[in-house]
Amino acid sequence: MTAIDDLLATISTLQRSDLERWISEELVAPQQDAGSLLFSDMECARVRLICTLTYELDIDSGTLPVVLSLLDQLYDTRQRLLSLTGAVAAQDKTIQAVIIAAMSAGGTSQRADQT
């Protein structure tokens, strides 16, 4: 866990006022411990991402929640895909072949539906 002052010292571009706004807007969610804000490794990475989006890519504050929401959805989808991949890999080779065939057939029918 990283304290707010340590986080500010680690990320040179980070402004305290911006971080406080992001916390109040619930874009980042530090834990509170005895009146101190503490950031998990995941939240520190999120702050770094928000800094990149804000300071380097000039994403405005009104657009930032939308971008973060889309990135959260993408991350969640990636995690689910990794879980699915693990579940398929744990199956017998015959079952794996059936799943792969069904996925291939599903991709073909979806493309046909879109035309």
Image (cartoon, helix red, strand yellow):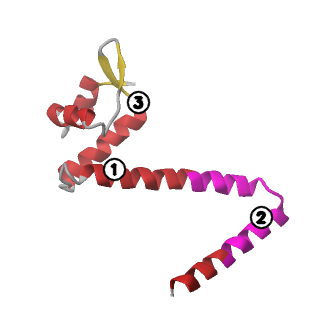
Per the model, the C-alpha gap separating discs 1 and 2 is 35 Å
* Type of the residue with mark 1: Leu
Range shown magenta: 80-105
- Say what secondary structure mark 3 lies in: loop
Q: Residue at x 18, y 53 (%)?
A: 60
User: Residue 22 placed where, x, y %?
Assistant: 24, 37
Q: Secondary structure at mark 2?
A: helix
Residue 103 to residue 19: above or below: below
Q: Residues within 10 Å of mark 1 (few under 14, many from 20)?
A: some
Q: Residue at x 20, y 53 (%)?
A: 56
Mark 1 sits on what residue? 68
Whole-percent x and y of residue 24? 24, 33
Query: Which image quarter: residue 100?
Result: bottom right
Residue 26 in the image: state x and y as whole percent: 30, 36
Q: Earlier in the sequence, mark 1 or mark 3?
A: 3
The amino acid on which the numbered mark 2 sits, given as a three-letter code, is Gln
Q: Which residue is mark 2?
A: 96
Residue 53 lies, in percent from the top left, at 25, 51
Answer yes or no: do the residues labelled 1 and 2 have beta carbons within 8 Å? no
Mark 3 sits on what residue?
40
- Amino acid type of the residue tagged 3 in the rendering: Ser
Determine whether 63 is above or below 107 in the image. above
Circle 1 sits in a helix, a strand or a loop, which is it?
Answer: helix
What is the magenta segment's predominant secondary structure? helix
User: Of circles 1 and 2, which is in front?
Assistant: 1
Q: Tell me: residue 96, above or below residue 34.
A: below
Q: Residue at x 37, y 35 (%)?
A: 43
